Image (cartoon, grey):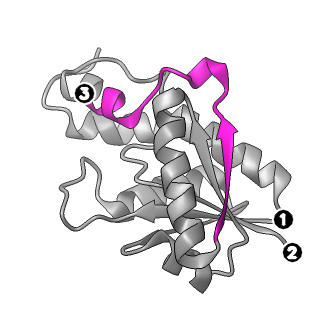
Amino acid sequence: MTTALCPGSFDPPTNGHLDVIYRSIEIFERVVVGVVHNPSKTPFLPADERVALLAELVEGRAEVESFEGLLVDFARDRSVDVVVKGVRVVSDFDYELQMAQMNWTLAGTETLLIPTNPQWGYLSSSLVREISKLGGDVDSLVPANVAKALKERSPKEHS
């Protein structure tokens, strides 16, 4: 059985993230979605909420859990064969290539870089957070459950 890990902060989960996760579910026998919890950062959505939102969206077709520490340790503990990362632009590729090479050096962990669907190539969690914080409409950028969670945190009214 081939197990893939789709890691990320998912703060918040976007339609672009889901595209990569759903495509991974179609390709691999087992998919783990790893929500990175970085204790040195203050997330917009707490890790447990991001896990719950993603679990609702994958409807049992993937395992979803948060982790701290090295990705390679989390991957090893879950018998992951390959890490799957979406790339939108050249800067993503540059960063993810460096991470893939480091993960290989540290633990022999393979990484598959998958181009994001062009429909979501412009989309990032940081843009969604900013739009949401300023009261903008993010309904077309994130799943409905995520849009609801963001609206609950927005200091401004959403129209």
Q: Is residue 154 magenta?
A: no
Q: Position of residue 137 (x, y in %)?
A: 35, 18
Q: How far is the residue under mark 2 from the one under mark 3? A: 40 Å
Judging from the image, what secondary structure is the residue with disc 3 in? Answer: helix
Q: Nearer the viewer, residue 145 or 141?
A: 141
Pointer 1 with pointer 2, Cβ within 8 A? yes
Furthest toward the top, the residue is: 159
Q: Residues within 10 Å of mark 1 (few under 14, many from 20)?
A: few
Judging from the image, what secondary structure is the residue with disc 2 in? Answer: loop
The residue depicted at 19 percent of the width and 57 percent of the height is 41
Q: State which quadrant residue 88 falls in.
A: top right
Q: Is residue 127 magenta?
A: yes
The residue depicted at 68 percent of the width and 81 percent of the height is 79
Judging from the image, what secondary structure is the residue with disc 1 in? Answer: loop
> Looking at the image, is mark 1 or mark 3 earlier in the sequence?
1
Query: Can the viewer see residue 42 in this picture?
Result: yes
Pointer 1 with pointer 3, Cβ within 8 A? no
Q: Which residue is mark 3?
A: 130
Q: Nearer the viewer, residue 18 or 28?
A: 28
Q: Which residue is mark 1?
A: 29
Q: Residues within 10 Å of mark 2 (few under 14, many from 20)?
A: few
- Give the magenta part as a residue range: 109-129
Query: Can the viewer see residue 64 in this picture?
Result: no
Q: Position of residue 48 (x, y in %)?
A: 37, 65
* Tag shown at residue 1: 2
What amino acid is labelled 3 in the image? Glu
Q: Position of residue 152 (x, y in %)?
A: 26, 39
Q: Nearer the viewer, residue 148 or 98?
A: 98
* Tag shown at residue 156: none
Image side of residue 91 versus residue 88, left or right: left
Q: How far is the residue under mark 1 from the one under mark 3? A: 36 Å
